[in-house]
């Protein structure tokens, strides 16, 4: 793939993964082929993650919407103890608190990118962080298409720093906690997909110094 194609593909993967961490709407996911599209995109990026996304698509078909919502709530919402809290600060701070200092760090990245997040969840919710990565990729692609190389470099640097400092350090633990916290095979496959994709992104793009 070309540089622009790689950027676009990775950004789309972040966006689709983000969608999977919002409250599930089975019919909408199937109608828009969210998991199949994710698998297709991942096939050119990381084959293991692509297999997990394909499994997500298969599992979703047999899911009952009510049970899917219950399992999502048990993992990420409550009202009882969360099986897999979706907030970075829980994993990054010794006191395991929500809205800690690391959450403030995340907000600073959002502000630096010129966006204001209006959400009912803390800024370091997994869905919001994944969506932010997609946003940074989209902005970088747009800048490159317009020939604004300096602006593109700014977004490239920002997404690498955000991924390395705010997202990557807690994904492995979160994914493992999520997988072990549920019997729902859709969410188990999502946990595996997230872990493999972000690990491949870290190795192939961030640590390797690749241009994407």
Image (spheres, rainbow, N blue to C red):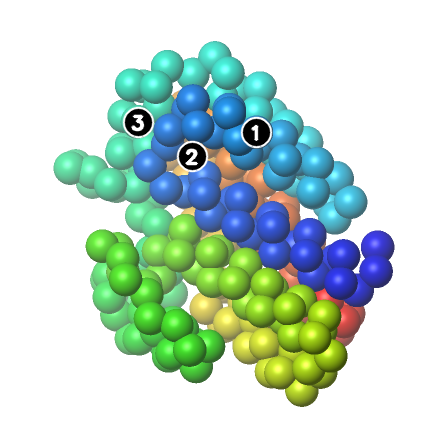
Element at label 1: loop
Instruction: Please provide percent x and percent y for residue 96.
Output: 27, 61
Instruction: Please provide percent x and percent y for residue 180.
Output: 42, 34
Q: Calculate the distance from the C-alpha at mark 2 to the C-alpha at mark 3.
A: 18 Å
Visible residue check, residue 156: no
When the figure is inspected, residue 28 is found, relative to residue 48, above or below; the finding is above
Q: Which residue is painted at 70% across and 36% down in the image? A: 40
Answer whether labels 3 and 1 touch (C-beta < 8 Å): no
Q: Closer to the camera, 200 or 121?
A: 121
Comparing labels 3 and 1, the label whose residue is closer to the camera: 1
Q: Calculate the distance from the C-alpha at mark 3 to the C-alpha at mark 1.
A: 19 Å
Q: Is residue 85 left or right of residue 146?
A: left
Q: Which residue is painted at 69% across and 52% down in the image? A: 9
Which residue position is annotated with label 1?
33
When the figure is inspected, residue 73 is found, relative to residue 93, above or below; the finding is above
Q: Calculate the distance from the C-alpha at mark 2 to the C-alpha at mark 1.
A: 26 Å
Which residue position is annotated with label 2?
180
Residue projecting furthest to the right = 1
Q: Closer to the camera, 31 or 182?
A: 31
Q: Residues within 10 Å of mark 3 (few under 14, many from 20)?
A: some
Q: Earlier in the sequence, mark 2 or mark 1?
A: 1
Answer whether labels 2 and 3 touch (C-beta < 8 Å): no
Quadrant, the N terminus = bottom right
Quadrant, the C terminus = bottom right
Element at label 2: helix
Q: Which residue is painted at 56% across and 38% down in the image? A: 192
Instruction: Please provide percent x and percent y for residue 102.
Output: 34, 72
Residue projecting furthest to the bottom = 150
Which residue position is annotated with label 3?
69
Q: Earlier in the sequence, mark 2 or mark 3?
A: 3
């Amino acid at each position: 793939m070309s540089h622009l194609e790689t950027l676009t593909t990775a950004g789309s993967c972040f966006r689709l993964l983000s969608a999977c961490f919002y409250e599930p709407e089975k019919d909408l996911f199937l109608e828009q082929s969210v998991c199949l599209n994710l698998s297709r995109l991942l096939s050119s990026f990381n084959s293991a993650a692509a297999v997990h996304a394909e499994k997500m698509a298969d599992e979703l078909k047999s899911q009952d919407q009510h049970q899917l919502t219950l399992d999502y709530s048990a993992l990420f919402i409550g009202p009882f103890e969360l099986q897999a809290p979706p907030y970075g600060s829980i994993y990054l701070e010794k006191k395991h608190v929500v809205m800690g200092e690391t959450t403030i760090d995340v907000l600073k990245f959002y502000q630096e990118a010129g966006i204001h997040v209006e959400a009912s969840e803390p800024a370091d919710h997994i869905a919001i962080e994944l969506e932010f990565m997609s946003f940074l990729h989209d902005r970088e692609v747009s800048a490159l298409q317009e020939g604004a190389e300096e602006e593109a470099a700014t977004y490239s640097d920002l997404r690498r720093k955000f991924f390395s400092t705010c997202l990557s350090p807690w994904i492995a633990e979160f994914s493992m906690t999520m997988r072990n916290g549920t019997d729902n095979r859709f969410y188990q496959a999502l946990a595996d997909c997230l872990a493999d994709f972000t690990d491949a992104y870290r190795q192939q793009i961030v640590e390797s110094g690749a241009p994407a």
